[in-house]
């Protein structure tokens, strides 16, 4: 529970509320790319970063409409940072889901393994 509250506070601190919905979108895009044979798995974080930066820039332009060059520079800098953080959050989400699945499989495996060991112990004692 403590880890979830830490993740929640990090999300609130580093991701703009307008762009939070991009995390599951980037996760879905990463899953689609993972199934693709044309794109190597090692390129998934890079693709998610580029797409995250682009989508973050679109959201930023739509919400603030910059008028001078300083605002454009700030928008670009914020978009790069947000895109990177969004991609990292999507990759983190993927890893959390993987670890949850592995944890579930290990628990099942340990239960099955323990019952096998008990049967072996019972046969040795007989």
Image: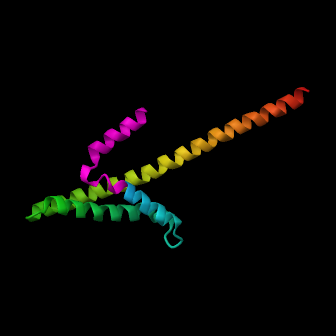
Q: Residue at x 88, y 30 (%)?
A: 124
Colour convention of the picture: rainbow
Judged by its main secondary structure, the magenta piece is helix
Magenta span includes 66: no
Residue 70 occupies which quadrant of the picture? Answer: bottom left
Please tell me whether residue 11 is drawn above or below residue 72 in the rendered image. Answer: above
Please tell me whether residue 94 is drawn above or below residue 108 in the rendered image. Answer: below
Magenta span includes 20: yes
Quick one: quadrant of the C terminus? top right
Task: Give how far across and how far down residue 84 sits, in percent.
Answer: 33, 56
Q: Residue at x 41, y 32 (%)?
A: 2
Report the side of 7 relative to 66 (left or right).
right
Q: What is the magenta range?
A: 1-23
Residue 9 occupies which quadrant of the picture? Answer: top left
Q: Which residue is drawn at 58% across and 46% down?
A: 102
Task: Give how far across and how far down residue 123 sits, in percent.
Answer: 88, 31
Task: Give how far across and how far down residue 83 sits, in percent.
Answer: 31, 58
Quick one: quadrant of the N terminus? top left
Please tell me whether residue 101 is drawn above or below residue 72 in the rendered image. Answer: above
Q: Considering depth in this image, is 69 or 12 the residue closer to the camera?
A: 12
Report the side of 76 relative to 94 (left or right).
left
Task: Give how far across and how far down residue 77 sits, in percent.
Answer: 22, 58
Q: Which residue lies furthest to the top in this view?
A: 125
């Amino acid at each position: 529970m403590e880890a979830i509250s830490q993740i929640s506070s990090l999300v609130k601190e580093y991701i703009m509320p307008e762009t939070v919905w991009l995390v599951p979108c980037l996760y879905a895009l990463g899953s689609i790319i993972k199934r693709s044979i044309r794109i190597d798995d090692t390129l998934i974080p890079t693709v998610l970063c580029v797409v995250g930066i682009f989508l973050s820039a679109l959201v930023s332009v739509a919400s603030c409409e910059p008028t001078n060059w300083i605002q454009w520079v700030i928008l670009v800098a914020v978009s790069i940072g947000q895109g990177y953080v969004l991609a990292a959050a999507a990759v983190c989400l993927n890893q959390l889901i993987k670890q949850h699945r592995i944890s579930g499989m290990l628990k099942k495996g340990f239960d099955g393994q323990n019952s096998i060991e008990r049967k072996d112990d019972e046969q040795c004692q007989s």
